[in-house]
Image (cartoon, coloured by chain):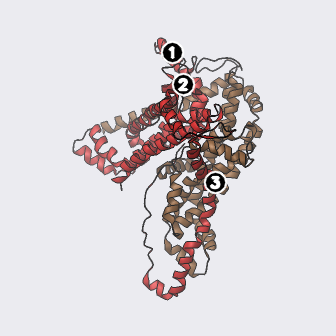
Amino acid sequence: MIVARREAWTGRLLLVLLMAVTLVPFLSLFLTALHPSGTYPQGLDWPSHPRWSNFTTAFRAAHMGELLKSSTLIVLGVVPVSLLLATMAGFAIGHLRIVGRRLVFLVFVLGLTLPFEGIITPLYYQVRQMGLLNTRWAIILPLVGLFMPFSVFWMRAHFVNMPEELSEGARIDGANVWQLFWRIHVPLAMPAISSLAILLFLWTWNQFLLAIVLVDDPAKRTMAGALGAFQGQWGTDIPLLCAGSLLILAPTLVIFLAFQRRFVSALLQGSLKG
Amino acid sequence: MARPTFDTTVEGGEIRPAPAADREVHSPARRTAGLRTQRWFGWLFVLPALAVYAVFVLQPLFLTVEYSLYRWDGIGPATWVGLDNYAKVFTDPDLSGTILHAFTLIVFFSLIPVVLGLVIASTIRRIAASRLAVAARTVLFLPQVIPLVAAGIAWSWLLSSTGLVNQLLARLGLGGMTRAWLGDFSTALPAVGVIGAWVLLGLCTLLLLAGMSKIDPALYEAARLDGAGPIREFVSITMANLRQEIGVCVTVTVIAALATFDIVYISTQGGPGNATMVPGLEIYYQAFSERQVGVASALAVVLMLLVLACVLPIQWLTREESR
């Protein structure tokens, strides 16, 4: 009993310590953001006159309104299409058991560990040739392709476990494959689809490499890409940079806190399956 | 970010269970014929996904290999140079150095988060259901949710010469150690590693904790009754049952280490000198600043093969017995 209780207390202590370490960078960003712009504050320090106006200045300097719009457009371009294509492909490979499914699946799985840097160079020339450089399509289209291995993998894992009897019944009732897919399997796959949606949203919103390589105008990038440009422009004004960083990471934070249960389970499952 | 990896689980039950009685009732000939067409028709469902994947992943993948065999500045004509670019990647110390840096980062991105994660998870295993632990799940996930760029900015500031890290050191009486951690040749790479460790520690801890919660508590009770100490218990119960989770953590973090880009780009840009240059960033510079598309592509091919060479054995080691 005593051993167990002591273990529980060391556990709690360790947990609090770990949480503190996780939160310190955020706290430091926040406190620094409140200092007069242009100063170099020392470590963690509550300023005597917090400058809340730094946030509005950074909001304007970073063109936050435009950035939010741009990132939202990119997410809307990437996530629904990826979900649809991956669900269809996962359904065919996992449930319809199409001819040659092993081979197609292997081709998709090959892309799972691919670092984006590996193909960024030809991607640049390809996108340029398509005349899409510096448009949001330059981020949207490649991302849909790059997310496909994981998405197909994820959806196949769901469909493989769906009992065949489910489709047997529908077929006897005269449903064709398309109806079988939309009326029966998509509704049942909703939990898997919505978890995938969360992951894809996060990965799109935070995408950095494609944004800085393929789009010059920060106003047409993702949030993360714009933050890179913001750092380049305001890197010497630390409080303003910190305020800007906080604003730029705020949207994901808000959405995370709103859907935290789903997020946590999606991320845990995501890396476990992955 | 949870990076996808391989899962070689084979489809369960290749033989479709079609009860004989059932088949007899509903005109067998038509149904099997229907299934056969469906097996071809199903391709229509795969084609759109495959098309996007082929154009934006497979095609650039082949192009990378092709580019790597040429000298090309991205504008003028390209000259065939065979394997010269690869020779350069392995002999030019600036280029081969990036690979060494990536491997050094594995210590910080993988070893530290996984080992610390194991220690922390097994310590907090008993209180995993408490309110504190539930709150911790949310907090520990924050680094996974924010853009790595933001983590880079926050940490650049913490590690700067007037940052919190130095302030703490000074307060502990270690004022002599203070420095601009990311600007010092000897500490820049480990400092970048610390940022990566911060990002990945929470994820590893939670993954391992989730794995531990699946272990039957009776096993621990039995071990205690048999007089096993905490270390013995850890090795023969916790570790033995966590093969798969450890494998996932190692895979995800090793890929993150080898393919790191965002953090380095933001915090050091590869400097000071070349002290923190990693393959991802070098590819970016070679291709878009130096206009050495061939060299960039050769390094890209090497990077992709390295990732596979590291990930496949890990998968193989951690899957085989757990199945």
Residue topped by disc 1: B178
Q: Which mark is residue A124?
A: none
Q: Which chain is red?
A: B
Q: How many marks?
A: 3
- Vertical arrangement, residue B262 with respect to residue B191, above or below: below
CA gap, disc 1 to disc 2? 22 Å
Residue B161 horizontal/vertical position (percent): 57, 17
- Vertical arrangement, residue A3 with respect to residue B317, above or below: above
Question: Helix or strand or loop: what does disc 2 sit on?
Answer: loop
Of the residues tagged 1 and 3, which is closer to the observer? 3
CA gap, disc 2 to disc 3? 35 Å
Which of the two discs, 1 and 3, labels the residue nearer the N terminus? 3
Query: Looking at numbered disc 1 in the image, what kind of residue is underneath it?
Result: Thr
Residue placed most toward the observer, A2 or B173 = B173
Query: Looking at numbered disc 3 in the image, what kind of residue is underneath it?
Result: Val
Which of the two discs, 2 and 3, labels the residue nearer the N terminus? 3
Tell me if residue A186 can be seen. no
Residue found at the far left of this picture: B226
On the same chain, marks 2 and 3? The answer is: yes
Q: Chain of mark 3?
A: B
Residue topped by disc 3: B55
Which of the two discs, 1 and 2, labels the residue nearer the N terminus? 1
Residue A46 horizontal/vertical position (percent): 63, 21
Q: Which mark is residue B274?
A: 2
- Vertical arrangement, residue B98 with respect to residue B177, above or below: below
Q: Which chain is brown?
A: A
Query: Looking at numbered disc 2 in the image, what kind of residue is underneath it?
Result: Asn
Tell me if residue A140 can be seen. yes
Residue positioned 58% across, 52% down in the render: B58
